[in-house]
Amino acid sequence: MPFAEAKTLDKALIPVIDIKPLIDNSDPVSVATNLYKASQEIGFLYVKGHGIPQLVIDNARSDAMNFFNLSNSRKEQVSLHGVHRGWIGPNRAIMDKNMKADLKESFIWGAEISKEQLSNKHYAYGENRWPISPPNFKDHSLAFFEQTDIVARQLLRGFALSLGLEEDFFMSDGTQALTRASYVFYPSQSEKMGKDQFGVGPHTDFGVLTVLSQDHIGGLQVLDLKGEWVHAPPIEGTLVVNVGDLLSRWTDGIFRSTPHRVVNRSGKERLSLVLAYDPAPSTMIDPLDVLGNHHSTQHKPITCGDYLTWRFEKSFS
């Protein structure tokens, strides 16, 4: 029984955008224009000039792989708890109730928040659960989080500029964001598993914006505008960025949240480093704030916290 198939990427479909002129403010408008075009058409893009030191990515990747190679009993010491922090083993995530569970396993964390600080915060914030081994796991993971969070915020600044909004529109709540990072490990899957087995099944991302560092293995597939799956292969020196459901909802569909999936047919293990940017839980997601009260929308206002809670409960057993 063969793998789920996908076409070779048409390089014009998912553009590579240099965001350095946005970050250094030398030409933010041109970058914003390119971000708007890509997000309106396919909702996926590669970015270069992001400024994350390669050592930060390499350290995080090395520690993540060492963690996933630990025994399950060791990883269970930091298994997922109620606030979505820690390790999720294989066959725990289900993108659709009619599909097989994903082969992937993940480790999830967020900004460091002490127990004292958590006492008066929304329950979606959580205390991170750090493994004892590898010894530098926490430091390297937080470095990746902090550097990638900077990139995500710059991108959201560009998206806001592209819509004629204040630069901090998507980040203007003023309280701590709900941003999470994750390491996602994909075992090699056998062709015998069939077309309906995925590393991660077809889905759209829950939140506002996803920033992804792929390894050299490949396996990411994106649904194009014709309804056909295409490979989104690794491009050295770039990050993959995609619009999430909340940003699409916030812009009333101007920005597209596109289905994607992972099929690891390489015969090797695959590892992705991911940051999912979301604003504070109290942030109201209302398209009329973006498009004006004259605009007609089918989306009722909802807080970021309420929306993410619903999506988490739906997708994780």
Image (cartoon, rainbow, N blue to C red):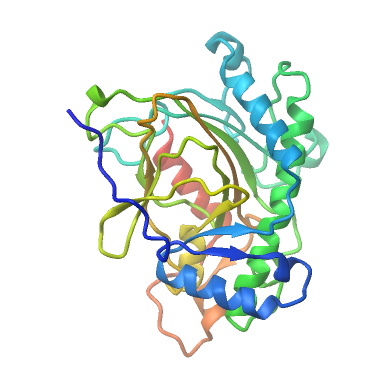
* 59 left or right of 276 in image: right
Residue drawn at 38 percent across, 49 percent down: 260
Q: Position of residue 265 (x, y in %)?
A: 35, 31
> On the image, which quarter does residue 158 sit in?
bottom right
Residue drawn at 56 percent across, 9 percent down: 73
> On the image, which quarter does residue 162 sit in?
bottom right
Q: In which quarter of the image is the N terminus?
A: top left
Closest to the observer, 262 or 47: 47
Residue drawn at 70 percent across, 52 percent down: 149
Q: Is residue 127 shown to the viewer in this render?
A: no
* 42 left or right of 67 in image: left
Q: In which quarter of the image is the C terminus?
A: top left
Closest to the observer, 24 or 242: 24
Q: Position of residue 70 (x, y in %)?
A: 59, 13
Q: Is residue 149 above or below residue 56?
A: below
Q: Is residue 275 above or below residue 302?
A: above
Q: Is residue 137 shown to the viewer in this render?
A: yes
Closest to the observer, 202 or 217: 217
Q: Where is residue 107 in the image (x, y as percent from the top left)?
A: 58, 30
Residue drawn at 40 percent across, 42 percent down: 314
- Please give the count of numbered marks on the rendered protein: 0
- Residue found at the very far left of the displayed protein: 1
- Residue found at the very far bottom of the displayed protein: 294
* 205 left or right of 158 in image: left
Q: In this view, does 290 lie above or below 123?
A: below
> On the image, which quarter does residue 40 sit in?
bottom left
* 14 left or right of 107 in image: left
Q: Where is residue 177 in the image (x, y as percent from the top left)?
A: 69, 53
